[in-house]
Every structure is written in C-alpha cells, then in structure tokens.
Amino acid sequence: MGERGLGEFEIIDLFRERGSFRHSWVQQGIGDDCAVLDMGGGRSLLVTTDLVVERVHYLRDVITPWQLGWKAMAVSISDIAAMGGTPRAAFAAAALEPGVDQAFLEALRDGMLACAERYGVDLLGGDTSRSPQDGVLCVTLLGTAASDQVVRRSGAQPGDVAFLGGPVGLSAAGLWALTEGREASERMDPEHRQALLRAHLEPQPQVALGRWLAERGLATAMMDVSDGVLQDLGHICQASGVGALVAGEALPVDRALVQAGALGCCKEPWRFALSGGEDYVLLFTASSDRQDEIVAGARHELGIELIPFAWIEPDPGLRIFGSDGIHNARPRGWDHFG
Amino acid sequence: MGERGLGEFEIIDLFRERGSFRHSWVQQGIGDDCAVLDMGGGRSLLVTTDLVVERVHYLRDVITPWQLGWKAMAVSISDIAAMGGTPRAAFAAAALEPGVDQAFLEALRDGMLACAERYGVDLLGGDTSRSPQDGVLCVTLLGTAASDQVVRRSGAQPGDVAFLGGPVGLSAAGLWALTEGREASERMDPEHRQALLRAHLEPQPQVALGRWLAERGLATAMMDVSDGVLQDLGHICQASGVGALVAGEALPVDRALVQAGALGCCKEPWRFALSGGEDYVLLFTASSDRQDEIVAGARHELGIELIPFAWIEPDPGLRIFGSDGIHNARPRGWDHFG
C-alpha cells in the first residue's frame, strides 16, 4: 500500500497468517464477523470487537453523545446478528477527549444502554481513559448460538441468491446530509431526511432476522454490511470460493436516497447504494429454491422486505449487470486505512 | 471533577448505577477486574477489556512496537490472573496513528503474540482502524475458572494479611528512567536499570500465582496493581467494607528502586513504591493463620517471594505506619482522567 499505509484487510491478514489456535474450543478464529468458541452442550459463544474512532467513524459536531453511544453498541451487536446469534453481554472501553463533562458521559452511557436494552444485552464491564485528542470507543460483544446454527461467510454456493435485509446507501447519504449536503438536504421531504440521518446515527442491527434465518437453516452465508455492499459481498464470495452477478440499475433504491441524489448527494443512487458503508443491514445468501419462502416468511413473520440483489456464480469476482451490459466491479467502500 | 473532568472511578460508577443484569448467567458485573459469566458445569467465563492510549499510557518515542504489543496484551492477561483464572482467548482492537508501516505492524503483532503465547492465549479476532493522531489499543481477554474458585475484591476480612506478589514501584521508576531520568539513570548499575525498564515495558502478569492461590482457596480477596498499591488496596477495602494498616518505611523496597531514588527518581522509595502504577503484580489478602504456609508455598512451588505489607482492620480507610507514627493515607496513584 506504500505511502498510503496498510489497508485494513491486509492488517487482518497479518494476524491471520500467524494464527495458531491451541485451544480445542476454537470453532472459528480470525476472518468472520465473530470468533466462535465451543461452550459445550451444543452451544457456541460468539465474540466480536469493534472500534469507533473520532474523525474516522464519526465527527464530534454532527453526532450527539447519545447517538454515539447507541451507534458504538449497535455496530458490535450487528456482528452477532451477522452470525445468526443472540447478543448477550457487552464490554465498553472509552478513551474520551479532553473536556468531556458529566452531561456528555451520561448521554453516552444512556445511548449505549438504550441500544443494549433494546437488544436484551447486559453492559457488564469496560475501561475508561482520557484521550489526548480524539475519542475512541471499543465495544466487545458476547453472544450465543446453537453451534449447528452459526452462519459463516464461507457457505455461499453457485446458484444461491444474495439478499439484503433492507435498503442500503441511506447511512452514507445521511453522512452527506450532515456534512457537505447540510444545506441541500434541508430541501428534502423531512421524513426522508430523517430516514437518512437515523440510518447513519442510529443504526438498527437485524438481530431478529439473523436468528430467524439461522434457526431455520435458510442462510448459506451471512455478514452485515459495514464496508459497503460490493465490498462485503466480495468478502462472502472470497470466503466461499465463488463469484457473483450483481443487479446494478435494477437494484431497488429507497426513495429517500433518490431524493438525496437529486439534490446532489450522488449521480447514480444505485451505484452509491452499492458502495456506501455503515448500513448494518444483513447480507446473506440462500438457495434460489427457497427464495419465495424466505421473502414471504420475512415479510409476514418479521415485517421485513428483503431485497434479492445478486446471484452467486462459480467463477470468482463480482460482475455488475447494468443497462449497458455486464461489467466487472471494482469493489469500493470503506477501508479505514484507505 | 469540575474543571479537571471526571475521574475514572466516577465514570465506572456512572455505569454501575445503571447496571441491571437481565441474564441469569451473570455472576459478577461491573466493579471487579473481570466480569464473571456462568458457563455451566461449574465453570465460569472471565472477561476483561483494557485500553492502552498513546500519551496517556505510553509515549511513542520510548516504547518499541513489540513492547507496546506485549504490554497491551499483558495488561489484560493480568486482569484474568487477578481473579485466579486461566487466560484463554484475546481480541485486539487497534486504532493506529498515521504513518505506521508494515514493520511497525509486524512488530506490534509479534509482541502481542509473544505475550499471548507465553501465557497460552489464542489471539482470535479484533478490529483495526486508522487514528487521526494517537494510537489506541484495546485488548479484550477471555479466561476460564472453576466457578467456586473465582477470587473477587470483596472478601477481605479483619485480621487478614495483605500480600504483594513482588516488588512494586519499578514500573513507575522505569518510566522515570525513560523520560526525565534518562541521563541520570545511565549512571545506574545496568542490571538495575534494565529491571526498571523491563517492569515498565514488558510486565509479566502473575497468572501462575493467581491460579495457585485460587485453586487452594488461599486468597480472600485479590486484584492486580495497576493504579498503585495504596489506591488498589483501597479498592479491595472499599469492596470488602474494611480498612487497612499499611507498612510504610518498613516496606521492602527493591534495590533497583533504591538506586533510582538516589539518582533523583524519588525522595522516599517506599512511598514511591506504594503510589507508582502499572506494576501488574498481584495484591491479595489471606487469613493471617495461613501466612507462613502461603509464603513458604509460593517460595518453594513457584519461586515467588511474596511481600506481606498490610493488615486488614475493621474500620474503613487506609493508615500508614511510618517511623513517626501512624498517619491516614491519601491514596495516590494513576487516575487516567486526573
């Protein structure tokens, strides 16, 4: 990566290449949304750690401390959802910038606890420190799952369909509306603008969907969309040794994003939706034979409108289906070292 | 508080006062070195998260990336040792300052892995991000213990003796030797200087001692010395509802610290030893009836020279026994928000 420094995924590889797991309880080490540990009795422990760094993942001026607490908790809960697990216990470490006061801390705590309570999670510990300049939050989440129901990234098969648990690109458009699109977005339908801001500031991890899919054995591979749909689908394809053909212009795009696009957020909302990060909806693959059953079940049992958006192919790589034909995709999205 | 911002322990209280643990597997929540979760079958899971923040816990110029990796891992392993547990799995999150290169990362990883391997720990996951200015590491450690052998902070009884697992103050003197005492410390016996630097840069968590005490049911309360002996003994006393009388000038002080004191590190080495932080030796209490058995056992079975240094009393507060009589102690030590 030269002068730009190392990419996030190369850093993960750096650890993976030295990974030697000496304990027999390790069912999954580095390389998925969570590590998976055998708890005995057919149960597994899922563990994930996520960083939220000021000026990388958030800007102090555009997120309230309550929202920051919510988001830091939600990001880690989403990793448990992505394996089909039930989130149980959280550990929060916070390095806080100079000048934080009691009101800031209480709001940060209340946001964390509101999200934890919403998902049935106990906040059991943590660490605090001052930070000389930027705030850094690190939330570790423990979850549980039946060992034979844990959904990994590596099970996608040619012929599978890839689904999204909801619309994507809203979070990235929300960031636009909070920063360079601040004035332009004031001209949006207030409900639409609110939807973008909420997607960015108060993401809602899809724990119920993840469990529903896992318990029924419906998903062959799953993760959550944090780096952008194309990049994350690329991770599933790489882990599964397959490729995918992605609906391009045919991707259903949320009306709020269409409106933001018309006001300057992006030229092609479908393309923006495929590359914008931090959506925290689930991305999963399933046999095409079960597509109708899955879409109808999620609609009626969970009230979730799934979006089929790609088809798994045997050959590696991602291809995008557009109005002008099929093109190879260069996955773009968030690489926090980029 | 006030203009200084909030103290670390008040922040912990802020979370504790809202702690409501909805899952029955929670045996210990916020307020000890680790959270304790019931794994079934008489086994408990211990979980701890620790931050290591640049310009708060370390200075980039005086610690190598290998040492930084070692120390970040060791600090969390020490929390598992402090409950009598066996460390098992680590999750490392790293927000890294601009300009880190491949060599830095490999050395950081190798330091983490060297410490993990030394203590039988698998590094199973993590997260990486860039950081705009300061490096922040957050290591979460999972350990295990027999549920009936977990040693908490809250079991100290009047009549107990408090022990240290080794000499204290060396780490704080090591920091002195790396910073304002850089020139003066060059005049030290090289072995002594090396002992100080090693205590500060490559702490050795006392896992074997913690397990030895826990398995034999010898310790009534235990923690590791991270904030300074007086402050940490104060935590045990507060959690146990007791007080303590601390040996002052009679505290055995390591010769390396005595030499550093003579060169300007501190006026009273015994006082410095009681307040310096980041020692990562164990501090535990045990019935005075068993003092001889414990000291002899640790010496012969583990090669560890324990230091009895305080006596638990029924009345709250810490008192220090000096040549000029007994004084109330104002616990001093590291408060990372101070």
Image: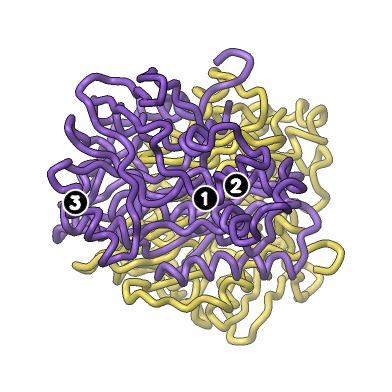
Chain colours: A purple, B yellow
Question: How many C-alpha atoms fall within 10 Å of the one at disc 1: few (<14), some, or many (≥20)?
Answer: few
Which numbered marker is on residue A259?
2
Examine the rendering and report whether any part of residue B146 can be seen: no
Task: Quickly name the residue at label 3.
Answer: A292
- Badge 1 element: helix
Residue A28, x across and y down, in percent: 27, 41
Q: What's the residue type where badge 1 is placed?
A: Arg
Rendered residue at 73%/53% (across/down): A186
Which numbered marker is on residue A255?
1
Q: Which quadrant of the figure contains the N terminus of chain B?
A: bottom right
Spatial CA span between label 3 and label 2: 30 Å
Q: Which quadrant of the figure contains the C terminus of chain B?
A: bottom right
Q: What's the residue type where badge 2 is placed?
A: Gln
B99, B123: nearer the viewer:
B99
Q: Is residue B162 left or right of residue A291?
A: right
Spatial CA span between label 1 and label 2: 6 Å
Q: Check if mark 1's residue and mark 2's residue have beta carbons within 8 Å.
A: yes
Residue A175, x across and y down, in percent: 64, 45
B31, A110: nearer the viewer:
A110
Q: Residue furthest top?
A: A2
- Badge 3 element: helix
Which badge, 3 or 2, comes first in the chain's sequence?
Answer: 2
Q: In the rendered image, which quarter is residue A323 located in?
A: top left
Q: Check if mark 3's residue and mark 1's residue have beta carbons within 8 Å.
A: no
Q: In the rendered image, which quarter is residue B52 located in?
A: top right
Q: Are marks 3 and 1 on the same chain?
A: yes
Tag nearer the camera, 3 or 2: 2
Q: Is residue B136 left or right of residue A91?
A: right
Rendered residue at 40%/51% (across/down): A166
Question: How many C-alpha atoms fall within 10 Å of the one at disc 3: few (<14), some, or many (≥20)?
Answer: few
